Amino acid sequence: MSVPQSWTPVTSADTAVPTHDQVVAGLKATDEGGADLVQLLTPEGERVTDPRFDRYAADIDLDTLKNLYRDMVLVRRFDREGNALQRQGQLGIWVPLLGQEAAQVGSGRALAPQDMAFPSYREHGVAWTRGVDPTDLLGIFRGTDHGTWDPIEKRFHLYTIVIGNQCLNATGYAMGQKFEGKVGDGSDAEATICYFGDGATSQGDVHEGFVWAAVYDAPVVFYCQNNQWAISEPTERQTRVPLYKRAQGYGFPGIRVDGNDVLACLAVTRWALEECRTGNGPVLVEAFTYRMDAHTTSDDPTRYRLADELELWKLKDPIERVRVNLVREHGVEQGFFDGIQAEADELAARFRQFCVDMPPPAPDRMFSKVYAEPSPTLEAQREAFLAYHASFEGA
Amino acid sequence: MAVLTMAKAINDGLRAAMERDPKVLVMGEDVGKLGGVFRVTDGLQKDFGEQRVLDTPLAESGIIGTAVGLAIRGFRPVCEIQFDGFVFPGYDQIVSQLAKLHFRSQGKVPMPVVVRIPFGGGIGAVEHHSESPEALFAHVAGLKVVACSNADDAYWMIQQAIASDDPVIFFEPKRRYWDKAEVDVSATPPPLHTSRLVRPGSALTLVGYGPVLKTCLEAATAAAADGTELEVIDLRTLSPLDLDPVFDSVRRTGRLVVVAEAPSEVSVAAEVAARVQEQCFHSLEAPVLRVTGFDTPYPPSKCEEDFLPDLDRVLDAVDRSLGW
């Protein structure tokens, strides 16, 4: 029986080390977003026009651009502090977002106050845009709680750790918005945004979310941050087609945006949310970006990806291109950047101090709010545990 | 006082809950025009519309996962899983989100969702249509689990489950759907999470739930003809268990037989046995015995007569306990 060439096991010694062409091909695979990539700010900081999306960024004046810069610098700063706190034993784990600041801040700032966001677990930058204090994230990673913000008040759901689950929850929420008549031309129109990664696109729940959102015309923006890596698995292990093209098969628009371009992410997400609020949802947005740090502080990317890749993406840094633009096109002076850096350092210091001061949970914390209506069985366990605990007092 | 089948009683209960609260939604496969494969939701879509009674895409994770999102939005979804064996694609959403969101949010996000599951065998069905997976749910913290056994209970329990701010897995014994009973719609029902003494007796305590409750009552009638009075308790709630009435009973009778269709290992019946020996050790005159399905996958339907606990197997266990 003949075996197709491509199925032949690779055994020869000279293929163990990738050739120059293979390295370049690999780099291009993660580096190039392709012709459909929406971009308003080049990696070199040059504002470029886009006939379709310029109008969604037309109101971005200098102050707004400065604020977006500030958002990204502050988010990156406390994210780096999170990594440091884990290395110093203050956190059990941290999930870094380094490199994804534009994808998160741009989309988060596109949301109207009444919109609802469903994050995965890396969306510290979106949390920031929703007014969730960064210290509210700490308990999750220190092991004192599962998130302390009020998801209804902040319109930012709690982190979802099981990959893809939130795509169905977000779709259900969006169906509720529609059932309540919140889709249309009214000023109170609402939409939902759902965050997930490239790895999640392989999950059944994401597929089902797409199906449900499509058949119920749910006002939900599926916002996929394709950061190229699902822990150690590259996007090519999840898909044959560019992710944004999958939307076509479900019957709704899909678009790929430069995820390191905060202006483009803002403009495209504004468009997508408007589509949803006016009854043309759902929409899939693929923010093409790069996870510049490890999956989590427990991960070691040197085992599975080339250092060259990171160097290439550093040239596309989401913050640096805004800084360059502010300087070159707007003449913003160094004092502004120094001021933001100082503010970022203050935030990091507050973040750190809050973390090290966090008290351990009370002994009976684990019994708290398991049910809305307490279970007598569980109450009995709690009382027995507390009595046992008290028996050590004075010992 | 109306005489209703259990299916109709649940239908009436759903209707009453939907009339009372516009946030109550019914959702599932074929629950709209068809009225569900067992007709439990018959006529609801016609009367409440397609936004209150949703014919969903054919995906159980989707049913539960979107119900979770609707509940976050403030709705009270009642999901129908078509058959017990089809719940597992939705099990992830049930365990990972539905059960945990109240705890994760420390009460800020309640999950008033009911998942109705027709369960158990005895209808001659193909594979996956006759299972008793209740232990898989009762084992999950954050969920409440109940099983109705008769039309009157079903009418009230479904309304109480919908009114609960906790997620409730609602097991309906499908082979009893067409059994009729008197339903008193003006009665004051007992709380949802209570077990109920349904037949007093002094010789032995017989505990069951769902489809086997009828078997237990038949066994008690048969034993009474021989002069042995069995006390029968309907568990009704599987999580949390309400075992105080069982403890009281066993302290009087000294003997307990637990009956269930589910396999015995690591089961609800096993938990009842363990708790009774903890609480009633000095009252027991005999070991606690279990009459259950076997620890096999649910068999081909021509074997189910042997798999399911029947009158003879229950009476055999009663004899063994009394002869100890």
Image: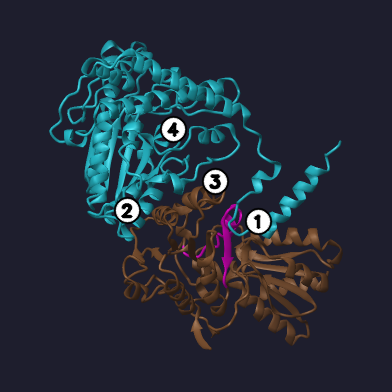
Chain colours: A cyan, B brown
Chain of residue at mark 4: A
Crowding at mark 2 (Cα within 10 Å: few <14, some 14-19, many 20+): many
Label 4 is placed on what type of residue?
A: His
Q: Which residue is mark 3?
A: B104
Vertically, is B117 above or below A358? below
Q: Residue at x 74, y 67 (%)?
A: B244
Say left or right for A282 vs B203: left
SS of the residue under disc 4: helix
**Do labels 4 and 3 touch, CB within 8 Å?**
no
Quarter in which the C terminus of chain B is drawn: bottom right
Query: What label does residue B265 carry, if any?
Result: 1
Residue under disc 2 on the same chain as residue under disc 4: yes
**Residue A77 horizontal/vertical position (percent):** 44, 22
Query: What label does residue A124 carry, if any?
Result: 4
Q: CA distance from mark 1 to mark 3?
A: 31 Å
**Residue A359 horizontal/vertical position (percent):** 65, 34
Crowding at mark 1 (Cα within 10 Å: few <14, some 14-19, many 20+): some
Q: CA distance from mark 4 to mark 3?
A: 18 Å
Judging depth in this view, the residue of B265 and A72 nearest the camera is A72
| N-terminal-most mark, 1 or 3 | 3
Label 2 is placed on what type of residue?
A: Trp
Q: Which residue is mark 2?
A: A212
Label 3 is placed on what type of residue?
A: Arg
**Do labels 3 and 2 touch, CB within 8 Å?**
no
| N-terminal-most mark, 2 or 4 | 4
Magenta region: B129-148
